[in-house]
């Protein structure tokens, strides 16, 4: 594959001729760094995951949001155990998952062993589905969009 030169964009001109003092003139100095406004920096909480369990008439919905990782292991396992305890179908809504690690995958596997029926994973992001495939867990669940 051959790279094509960029068109319509000229690099900035740099004068490297020596000045009368003998020092070379390079690109202009960068302006001083400006602090980033605090409100534009995401807080740790914005990256944190959450899990909620809601009982419906004939099933339980587990909603996973954000990063499902080791930082929320206890919360995740407590919620999954609560969902399985109802003895009805469990639907796990994964549509808002932005990251999942082995802790999250093992929690889902644990749920599959506890639940009265095969859990249904809903709106699974492509990266999460690939991880389920790599670990062989895609055969343990039902999937819905």
Image: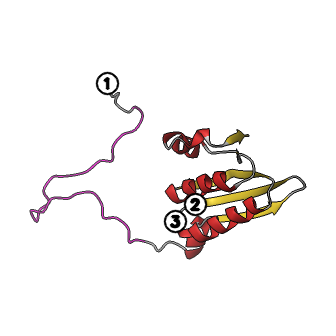
CA gap, disc 1 to disc 3?
44 Å
Q: Residue 26: within the magenta?
A: yes
Near mark 1 (Cα within 10 A), the count class, few <14, some 14-19 or many ≥20, is few
Horizontal relation, residue 20 to residue 108: left or right: left
Q: How crowded is mark 2: few (under 14 residues within 10 Å), some or many (20 or more)?
A: many
- Residue 60: x and y, percent? 80, 56
Mark 3 or 2, closer to the camera: 3
Residue, x 33% and y 43% (percent of image)? 11
Viewed as shown, does residue 99 lie left or right of 119?
A: left
> Observer-nearest residue: 113 or 92?
113
Q: What stretch is highlighted in magenta?
A: 7-33
Q: Tell me the CA gap for discs 2 and 1.
A: 39 Å
Please tell me in which quadrant of the rendered image residue 44 appears: bottom right
Please indicate whether residue 22 sits to the left or right of residue 50 in the image. Answer: left
Q: Name the residue under label 3.
A: 70
Mark sitting on residue 67: 2
Is disc 2 placed on a helix, strand or loop? strand
Q: Mark 1 points at which residue?
A: 2
Name the residue located 40 percent from the left edge and 38 percent from the top edge. 9
Q: Nearer the viewer, residue 106 or 63?
A: 106
**3 relative to 30, above or below:** above
The label on residue 136 is: none
Residue drawn at point x = 65 percent, y = 51 percent = 112
Could you tell me residue 26's position as x and y percent? 22, 57
């Amino acid at each position: 594959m051959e790279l094509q030169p960029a068109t319509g964009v000229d690099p900035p001109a740099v004068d490297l001729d020596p000045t009368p003092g003998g020092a070379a003139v390079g690109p202009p100095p960068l302006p001083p760094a400006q602090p980033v406004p605090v409100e534009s920096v995401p807080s740790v909480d914005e990256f944190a995951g959450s899990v909620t369990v809601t009982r419906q008439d004939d099933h339980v919905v587990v909603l996973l949001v954000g990063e499902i990782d080791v930082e929320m292991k206890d919360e995740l396992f407590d919620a999954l155990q609560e969902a399985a305890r109802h003895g009805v179908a469990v639907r796990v809504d994964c549509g808002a998952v932005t990251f999942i690690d082995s802790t999250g995958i093992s929690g889902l596997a644990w749920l599959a062993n506890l639940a009265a029926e095969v859990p249904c994973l809903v709106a699974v992001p492509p990266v999460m589905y690939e991880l389920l495939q790599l670990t062989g867990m895609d055969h343990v669940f039902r999937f819905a969009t």
